[in-house]
Image: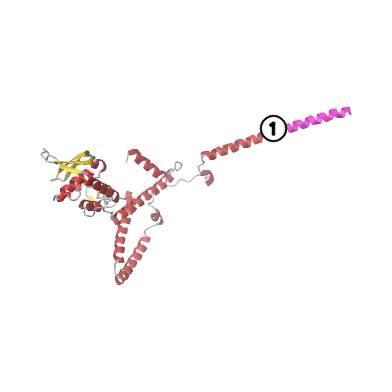
Amino acid sequence: MLTTQASESCNAQVRLFLKPRHDLDLFFIHFSSLLADKRRKETESDYNAKQSIPYIMLENSPILQHAAKIFTPKIFEKIQKQYLVAESYIIKKLSDNRDDGMIGYLIYMMEDSERSDERVVLVDISTTTLVCECRMFRTLGVLCCHMIKVMRLLGDFGEASMRSIPDHYILKRWTLEAREREVVDVDGSVGPSAPSENDAGKGIAMRYRETTATLNQLAMNMSMADEKDYNKWMGVLKKVCNEANKALSKTITSEDRRSVPITGLTLKEKSNPRSHGKERYKSTNEKERRRKKREYRKRMKSIEVVTVDDTAHSDGHLSDLDDNIAQWL
């Protein structure tokens, strides 16, 4: 994704929660809602990825089986697509008398009796290193079809290290365990994978994921048990859940249930509170209609004043005319 595309995507999501007229207090409140929504979606994606098994088109492929266990569904689909594209390529071994000890392979496709999309892949079997001219792995972090073609060839000829994806070609950000990390203390010691106080939202997501995974596995085992064992362990489970809910309900406040609380902020009281209708933001069309109404009222008042003056003036002329007529009678 380009930088501009990432920026536009982020702005589109932020606009759903934040408005230009929000003050600082409302900004933090709505921003916390945005973070809570993002964390909820991440938790759902992690849960669905870990509880589902991707569809493997070639079930006998050890490379695809290995990729399905470690990568997220979307990344696995990309690798499987590259694996299928590699079927249409032809591989040819080049001279292996290189100074660096690497072996070269020419990968190409035949179209109308002519070679196309020629790529050279260099391999060092001792270190399971592969280098391709297309540089797809360096750009996207995903194995290209040319590297997969060479891995399949070497794996078929007995190279066990090439029958699965080497560790240095597995980027952690594409794996199912991407969000699990080790926490390093200030003194350099490695602590447990736990969130800090400033990362409370992520801690909630991690605890939710672990709890749902445990209960989901328990539900699967209980559903396959016979009636006697099911009733026995269901009673134990209900008892444990009731005790846990009672104990936790005493420590969890309503604020904790709604979202991660914001600390250190105080709401400023307004000295002259206005009505809700006046606080509402007026659009340009509404302002224009109000302006036209004011001009119309002013124009109507001026017309009424002119009409009254003309009527009074005409009445004065009629009275003078009546006096003149009376003199001749």
Side of 231 where 273 appears, left or right: right
Can residue 107 be seen in the rendering of this structure? yes
Q: Circle 1 is placed at which residue position?
A: 306
Q: Residue furthest right?
A: 329
* Residue at x 38%, y 50% (from the top left corner): 37
Say if 295 sits above or below 270 in the image. Answer: above
Q: Considering the numbered disc 1 on the image, is that residue within a helix, a strand or a loop? A: helix
The part of the image, by quadrant, that contains residue 135 is: top left
For the residue pair 84 and 40, the one nearer the viewer reads as: 84
For the C terminus, which image quadrant? top right
Q: Report the amino acid beneath label 1.
A: Val
User: Residue 244 appears at what percent x and percent y?
Assistant: 34, 63
Q: Main SS type for the magenta part?
A: helix
The part of the image, by quadrant, that contains residue 232 is: bottom left
Q: Residue furthest front?
A: 112
Q: Which residues are magenta?
A: 308-329
User: Residue 18 appears at what percent x and percent y?
Assistant: 42, 44
316 in the magenta segment? yes
Q: Residue furthest bottom?
A: 228
User: Residue 41 appears at what percent x and percent y?
Assistant: 35, 51
